[in-house]
Image (cartoon, rainbow, N blue to C red):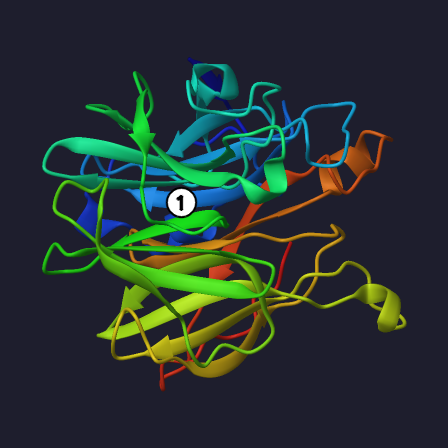
Amino acid sequence: MKTISITTLLFTFVSLSGYSQENQEKMAGNPFITHMYTADPSARVWDDGRLYVYASHDIAPPKGCDLMDQYHVFSTDDMVNWIDHGEILRSSQVSWGRPEGGFMWAPDCAYKNGTYYFYFPHPSDSNWNNSWKIGVATSRYPAKDFTVIGYIKGMETHIDPCVFVDDDGQAYIYQGGGGVCLGGKLNDNMIELDGKLQPMEGLEDFHEATWVHKRNGIYYLSYSDNHDAKQNDGIKGDNRMRYAISDNPLGPWKYMGIYMEPTNSYTNHGSIVEYKGQWYAFYHDSTLSERNGEFNDWLRSICVDKLNYNPDGSIQLVISD
């Protein structure tokens, strides 16, 4: 287990309820993980009081996104100092997976009744584009000892799983890609669908990267769009992050707008989470590879910035550092 000290801090212990604005202002710089390339951050806060990020791993030298072959977990309790808990899963551990490996794309994690459920997309055949499955690995711990137990039957051949557990304990799973966004209920066992998936209606220019969170009784579905910088002079990067709202976790959704403009990466993939009274937007860019003199869209790094809401519940545009 490796501790990454981003900056030297002297601070006194405060309780969660007493977390001060001064501490909220202190954050690691972006990207906040610099010893390896990472992408697709799924941020979760668990009962131990830490914020965990489940990320995919870009491998250098890249071959597009084909070589992505493993997942790492990082955590913090102050948004400044991050611990790398190490690798938790790679494609060779997936018995039903593509024999050539690779293609371990954007994951997510959920918790219920003492078990952590790690959801990941992975092809089951050499013909990767048409054989995606949503795999599940479980553990009693948030950042180690995950074992693949299978995949969720009945899901479509799409990527980007997101699992949202509502206040009443009902879990919902979403997946998408290529303009398609689907969602549905999970059974109590967290590994089977409760009914069929249904299209998420009301989204504009959906591409991929579904994420669902809830605030003040409002459900938010955020995602990346199909923006193409080559068709927009003077704008660097491609995917923008958009969002929609609903009074139901399965919609229909009311489109609200863009909450993040493109980074310097061809892709973007984000998550939104509240931690110690402050909301945060996680995403990735290619700044670290640019800084290292090997700029490449497929050598990405995870980043985080504060996310704020207007009084009416709409999201303010995130200003990336």
> Which residue is depicted at the point 22% across and 44% down?
192
- Taking the spot 14% from the left edge, 40% from the top edge, the residue there is 189
The type of residue carrying mark 1 is Ala
Q: Residue at x 44, y 69 (%)?
A: 308
Residue 122 lies, in percent from the top left, at: 50, 34
Left or right: 140 in relation to 6: left
Residue drawn at 38 percent across, 47 percent down: 23
Whether residue 12 is visible here, answered yes or no, is no
Looking at the picture, does residue 39 appear above or below residue 36?
Answer: below
Residue neighbourhood size for the residue with mark 1, other residues' Cα within 10 Å, grouped as few (<14), some (14–19), many (≥20): many
Q: Nearer the viewer, residue 69 or 30?
A: 69
Task: Name above or below for residue 281 compared with residue 64.
Answer: below
Residue 1: x percent and y percent? 42, 13
What residue does disc 1 label? 43
Is residue 255 among the parts visible in the rendering?
yes
The residue nearer to you, when weighing 221 against 21, is 221
Q: Position of residue 116 (x, y in %)?
A: 23, 32
Count the labels in the image: 1
Q: Quadrant of the C terminus?
A: bottom right
205 left or right of 85?
right
SS at mark 1?
Answer: strand
